[in-house]
Image (tube, rainbow, N blue to C red):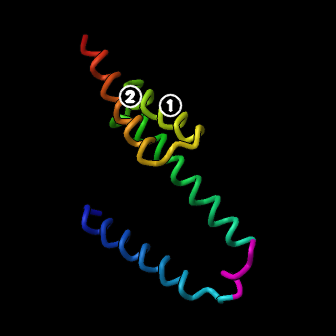
Amino acid sequence: MNLWTWIVLACALAFATKLLGYSLPERWLKNPRMNGVAACLTVGLLASLTVMNTLASGTQLVWDARLGSLAVAALALWLRLPFLAVVVLGALAAALLRWAAML
């Protein structure tokens, strides 16, 4: 199979999944348990994407400024700082760590 075959299959699978979501009975979606499952899946997906973008570079694990930046941003979130402050502090930490690595 060539690349375009895989792309078309992935598109068909995505369309079928979305169509299945629209086909579910409304009472299933109104179930409080479904809201809990959806919330947990969302948090899990976001956490896994954050870890992958922080620790992965190609096929290798790397320990660089991104990890320190994530730690600073997590601390800022834990301190309940405004989101803009979290982003600025994370970016500042990454810049300082990369600058220190160049010295």
Image quarter where the C terminus lies is: top left
In this picture, which residue range is highlighted in magenta?
27-32
Residue found at x 51% / y 52%: 46
* CB contact under 8 Å: marks 2 and 1: yes
Q: Which mark is residue 71?
A: 1
Q: Amino acid at mark 2?
A: Ala
Residue found at x 39% / y 31%: 66
Q: Is the residue 54 above or below the residue 34 in the image? A: above
* Circle 2 SS class: helix
For residue 78, side relative to residue 65 (left or right): right
Say few, some or many: other residues with alpha carbon within 10 Å of mark 2 (under 14 / 14 to 19 / 20 or more).
many
Spot occupied by residue 1 in the image (x, y as percentages of width and height): 29, 63
Q: Which mark is residue 51?
A: none
Q: Label 2 to label 1, Cα distance in Å?
A: 9 Å
In front of the other: 60 or 32: 32
For residue 6, side relative to residue 37 (left or right): left
In front of the other: 4 or 76: 76
Q: Where is mark 2, residue-wise?
A: 93
For residue 74, side relative to residue 36 (left or right): left
Residue 29: in magenta span: yes
Spot occupied by residue 79 in the image (x, y as percentages of width and height): 58, 38
First reached walking from the N terminus: tag 2 or tag 1? 1
Residue 30: quadrant of the picture? bottom right
Spot occupied by residue 27 in the image (x, y as percentages of width and height): 71, 87
Q: Is the residue 17 above or below the residue 75 in the image? A: below
Residue found at x 40% / y 42%: 87
For residue 50, side relative to residue 35 (left or right): left
Residue found at x 75% / y 71%: 33
Q: Amino acid at mark 1?
A: Ala
In front of the other: 25 or 42: 42
